[in-house]
Image (cartoon, rainbow, N blue to C red):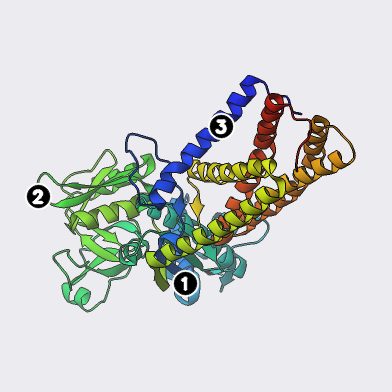
Amino acid sequence: MLEFPLWKKLWLWGLTLALSAAALPSLFGAANLPWPSALPSPQINLGLDLAGGSHLLLEAKAEDVTAQRLTNMEESVRQLMRGASPRIRIGDVSTANDRLSFMLEDASDIDRARGLIEPLMMGTGLARDWDLQVIDGQRMVLIPTQSGINNAVNDAMEAATEVVRRRIDELGTREPTIIRQGDTRIVVQVPGLEDPEALKALLGQTAQLEFKLVDLTALPENVAAGIAPPGSEIFPYAPGSGREGSFEAVRRLGGIRGDNLTSATAGVSPETNQNVVNIGFDTQGGAKFAKLTRENVGKPFAIILDGQVLSAPNINEPILGGRAQISGSFTAESANNLAIALRSGALPVPLEVVEERTVGPDLGADSIRRGMIAMLIGSLAVITLMIATYGRFGIYATAALVLNVLTLLGIMAGLNATLTLPGIAGFVITIGAAVDANVLINERIREERARGRKVIAAIETGYKEASRAIYDANITNFIAGVLLFIFGTGPVRGFAVVLVIGLFTSVFTAVTLTRMWVAGWLRKARPTDITI
């Protein structure tokens, strides 16, 4: 137990010093001291409650998901009927009252149409996403089931949460908290971001990009009055497009959506010297875009973003290669924000900010100051008690306590972990709990000496027997910390991170390092008695 060969000493000291050195950049930053730029600088991120930042609560409407599902189902049904051999002709299509209905021109096609639609109605498991009714032997009505709506809302919110995460990551912020709250809400906390306006603009942008053919049959007076021809819909022009206040009629179906985008970057057009966004499609999207432009050379098509027309240029020639350019009176910043939104993917459902608040850095600084005071007072009290009670062994415990804090900070910095206010509480608890191991060891050594064991035998037995209780206690704490991390959110996770890492560092420093120091002292001094 007390044998420490040279290689083991070098390994333990090297690991301890390396982890302690990793904590220095964070300590320098907390003290507002410069850190040499030539040296590595792993940092501990500060949570929202310490660094300040923005808190947003986003909410989606289930009706928007239902409306999108109806549109997608209508387009799928039209494609299936059009692709059937022979073609099944339908008419009188309606999506009123949250259901899709259409009339078959030939009642004898009812069985063929049902067979084609059946696969679209199935959901996950045995439950159906849609119910099918046939009225008067010729009209088919598709009605979304409640389980289908619930699944669609859940899938949309899961996808929206991931899109929000990717967009915030594009901003270069560290350790945002993004979690679902209830069925239709998402909580977003971004430390270090004091102005939420840019964040709101980015997250509030659905980034639903569409390319739709302009309906050339629409009469200008009807478009201005908001009256669209059958099969078409009207969109307003976006602010900054140069045609604010006017409208455009476009074909409702048959266009291309931005689901197949693979890239989006802000740039400057060499022809016009204007800010633009260059986009690229995947193979499938590129083929669709090439087909659309090849079949409609000379016709205008509208570039629509979130229900507003950016521009409606003519297709002068087929656009091949899966690459295109979006223009629309962008500034450099707005072009970059649009590129970020497109790269991260379109939100499957619009999100509305229902709550926002900003946490100032002054509150975080005060929390850090108070936490440091509490940690300092606790440390001094523990150090005084340990030295007064156990003498030399108390000094070893004190040194282990200091290294415990440094190695804990070093590991957190290396993992790029986030420190929250509950995390500081975890530090204070770790300081108190870290010396428990030394108290158990020292008391056990004292008992063994009282039983008449010699110095070396008493120390060896003390470490051996106390280690069992130490490991058992820390295993139960480890399980509790892991469960807190898995099931907790935000600040609870911050506490769990410090707690779990602190368990490892406290056992390492309080047991392994002190045992190495005691073994070295015994070999050098060879005492016949000890005061403990």
Within 10 Å of the Cα at label 1, are there few (<14), some (14-19), or many (20+) other Cα atoms?
some
**Identity, as a three-letter code, of the amino acid under mark 3:** Leu
Within 10 Å of the Cα at label 2, are there few (<14), some (14-19), or many (20+) other Cα atoms?
few
Q: Give whichever of 300, 439 is nearer the camera.
A: 439
Distance CA(mark 1)–CA(mark 3): 53 Å
| First reached walking from the N terminus: tag 1 or tag 2 | 1
The residue at the far right in this view is 451
The residue at the far front in this view is 528
**Identity, as a three-letter code, of the amino acid under mark 1:** Lys
Q: Secondary structure at mark 3?
A: helix
| First reached walking from the N terminus: tag 3 or tag 2 | 3
Q: Give whichever of 274, 67 is nearer the camera.
A: 274
Q: Secondary structure at mark 1?
A: loop
- Residue 257 visible in image: no
Distance CA(mark 1)–CA(mark 2): 40 Å
Q: Which residue is mark 3?
A: 15
**Identity, as a three-letter code, of the amino acid under mark 2:** Thr
Q: Quadrant for residue 328, please give it.
A: bottom left
Q: Position of residue 518 (x, y in %)?
A: 69, 33
Label disc, if present, on residue 61 of the rendered structure: 1
Within 10 Å of the Cα at label 3, are there few (<14), some (14-19), or many (20+) other Cα atoms?
few
Q: Which residue is mark 2?
A: 272
